[in-house]
């Protein structure tokens, strides 16, 4: 019984320590962005990696998400004779919820895992130690550019996701199912407000921070060898995805 | 001068350093020798603040570096350079970019001046036509040379070498040792080498420290160590299978 309680205590302390380290890492990373944002060339390189190179997967996912919304929305709305509202339904679903969340999940799978693997390999091959022995701050060269790039890229990718998704819904709704093309867009213009767009961008911006935070943190504290990096990468993707969904709920309840 | 005072360090339940005391003489080469897994690299990382002791103090030029903030520690590290066991070159950068990196980040030299200094540094370690190669295109010996060139570029006062010749053939091993000896004599820096290259290391180092069971068992000149009566030191130097190292009792 005593051993069981000890094991619970040890586990709890370990989890609390991990949580503390993770929070401390975020605080220092944000502080570093203000003090040592890194060179513009390093930031642009990361914007290219996190943003530009994610474009294909974002466009593809957005197109099919919009098309599915078009199909499902049409099916539901025809039951009430209001298929003219299809554009509004697709746009609000994408702008408020699906655009930020799905684009963040896609970037997590593509770039978040790569960030963890890159930093993890640098950690186990002593490249981060080498940087520290040169009296250079790894946060300036490795962490800050990734945070800034994720914060720039995510809202832009989300905007692209929304636009492509809306046109995906238009292709299915208007071209395949015969919804009035004028109604699709005009109802959308009437229903979508600035606060809908704003809440989507606030979400995607904060999801960008989560992707960079967990991706960098898991890599920076990766365990030993290839197995350590592999474990860190898996944990990074799982934790980031879960955090995005949990944080999405809290943000939605605040921004509604 | 680096002083390690009563250093204790454990990883989980494993005690690595157990009340270690060591003073590194200025402007000389000190080699830390000892069986594998005895904490030689851990000891080296304490000297530059990459690891913090559980107990004890590390003094660099009389000032403690234990518990310093990152910015304060970086000021101390300006005096240091370190050559890692696997060179620790940035694998996404070419040889030129690796060597130029500290110059680009820490000096205001022009591009042409940096190119000139990198060329000289690579020439000094005997490397030619490797500027555009990536670390994974280099042999082990070449990587170590690039690591050495990068370390010496900012003319540090103290250079730490973590097993600089591990995994190299005897000819290249000797060449690297010769290079360390020549550069130390030329620049006059304080060198600390972690090594198990017996007897080669006796030709390179001015002082030898034998690490065993988390403590410095013996410190002296290469001659004193070679003539030691201590059974652990004698066994380690001779490479004999029989003796206290095998039994684990000093």
Image: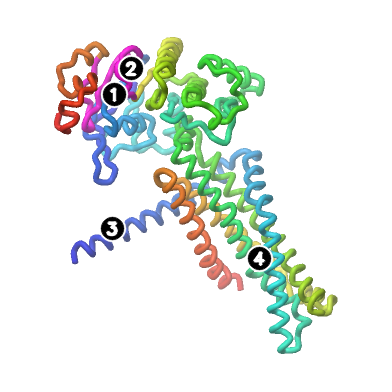
Q: Same chain for marks 4 and 2?
A: no
Please give the residue where the numbered disc 1 appears in the rendered image: B33
First in residue order: circle 3 vs circle 4: 3
In the rendered image, is residue A173 in sight?
yes
Which residues, given as a range, are shown in magenta?
Answer: B195-220
How far apart are labels 1 and 2 at the CA level?
A: 9 Å
Q: Nearer the viewer, mark 3 or mark 1?
A: 1
Identify the colour scheme used: rainbow
Q: Quadrant of the N terminus of chain B?
A: top left
Q: Chain of mark 3?
A: A
Please give the residue where the numbered disc 3 appears in the rendered image: A10
How far apart are labels 3 and 4 at the CA level?
A: 41 Å
Residues at discs 3 and 4 in contact (Cβ within 8 Å): no
**Element at badge 3?**
helix
Please give the residue where the numbered disc 4 appears in the rendered image: A99
Q: Same chain for marks 1 and 4?
A: no
**Element at badge 2?**
helix
Q: Same chain for marks 3 and 4?
A: yes
Q: Which numbered tag is attached to residue B201?
A: 2
Q: Where is residue B93? Give x, y as percent.
A: 58, 33
Q: Chain of mark 1?
A: B
Q: Residues within 10 Å of mark 4 (few under 14, many from 20)?
A: many
Q: Where is residue A201? Give x, y as percent.
A: 65, 62
């Amino acid at each position: 019984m005593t051993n069981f309680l000890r094991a619970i205590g040890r586990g709890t302390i370990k989890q609390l320590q991990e949580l503390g380290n993770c929070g401390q890492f975020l605080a220092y990373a944000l502080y570093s962005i203000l003090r040592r944002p890194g060179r513009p060339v390093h930031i642009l390189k990361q914007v290219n990696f996190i943003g530009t190179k994610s474009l294909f997967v974002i466009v593809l996912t957005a197109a099919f998400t919009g098309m599915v919304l078009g199909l499902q929305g049409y099916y539901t709305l025809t039951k009430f004779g209001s298929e003219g509202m299809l554009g509004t339904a697709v746009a609000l679903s994408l702008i408020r919820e699906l655009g930020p969340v799905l684009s963040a999940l896609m970037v997590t799978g593509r770039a978040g895992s790569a960030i963890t693997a890159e930093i993890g390999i640098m950690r186990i091959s002593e490249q981060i130690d080498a940087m520290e022995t040169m009296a250079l701050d790894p946060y300036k060269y490795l962490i800050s550019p990734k945070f800034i790039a994720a914060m720039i890229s995510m809202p832009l990718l989300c905007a692209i996701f929304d636009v492509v998704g809306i046109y995906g819904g238009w292709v299915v709704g208007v071209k395949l199912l015969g919804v009035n093309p004028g109604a699709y867009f005009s109802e959308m213009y009437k229903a979508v407000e600035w606060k809908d767009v704003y809440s989507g961008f606030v979400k995607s911006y904060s999801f960008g921070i989560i992707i960079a935070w967990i991706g960098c943190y898991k890599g920076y504290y990766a365990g030993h060898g290839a197995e350590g990096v592999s474990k860190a990468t898996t944990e990074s993707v799982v934790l980031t995805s879960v955090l995005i969904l949990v944080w999405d709920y809290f943000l939605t309840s605040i921004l509604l | 001068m680096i002083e390690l005072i009563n250093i204790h360090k454990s990883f989980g339940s494993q005690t690595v350093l157990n009340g270690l005391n060591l003073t590194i003489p200025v402007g000389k080469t000190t080699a830390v020798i000892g069986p594998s897994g005895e904490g030689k690299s851990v000891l080296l990382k304490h000297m530059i603040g990459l690891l913090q002791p559980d107990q004890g103090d590390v003094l660099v030029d009389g000032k403690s570096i234990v518990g310093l903030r990152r910015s304060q520690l970086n000021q101390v590290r300006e005096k240091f350079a370190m050559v890692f066991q696997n060179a620790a070159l940035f694998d996404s950068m070419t040889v030129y970019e690796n060597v130029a990196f500290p110059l680009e980040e820490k000096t205001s030299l022009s591009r042409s001046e940096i190119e000139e200094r990198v060329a000289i540094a690579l020439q000094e370690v005997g490397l030619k036509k490797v500027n555009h190669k990536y670390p994974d295109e280099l042999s082990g010996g070449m990587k170590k040379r690039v690591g050495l060139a990068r370390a010496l570029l900012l003319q540090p006062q103290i250079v730490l070498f973590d097993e600089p010749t591990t995994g190299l053939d005897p000819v290249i091993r000797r060449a690297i040792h010769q290079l360390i000896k020549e550069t130390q004599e030329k620049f006059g820096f304080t060198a600390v080498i972690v090594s198990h290259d017996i007897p080669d290391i006796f030709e390179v180092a001015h002082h030898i420290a034998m690490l065993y069971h988390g403590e410095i068992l013996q410190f002296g000149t290469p001659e004193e160590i070679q003539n030691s009566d201590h059974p652990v030191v004698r066994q380690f130097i001779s490479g004999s299978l029989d003796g206290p190292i095998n039994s684990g009792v000093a």
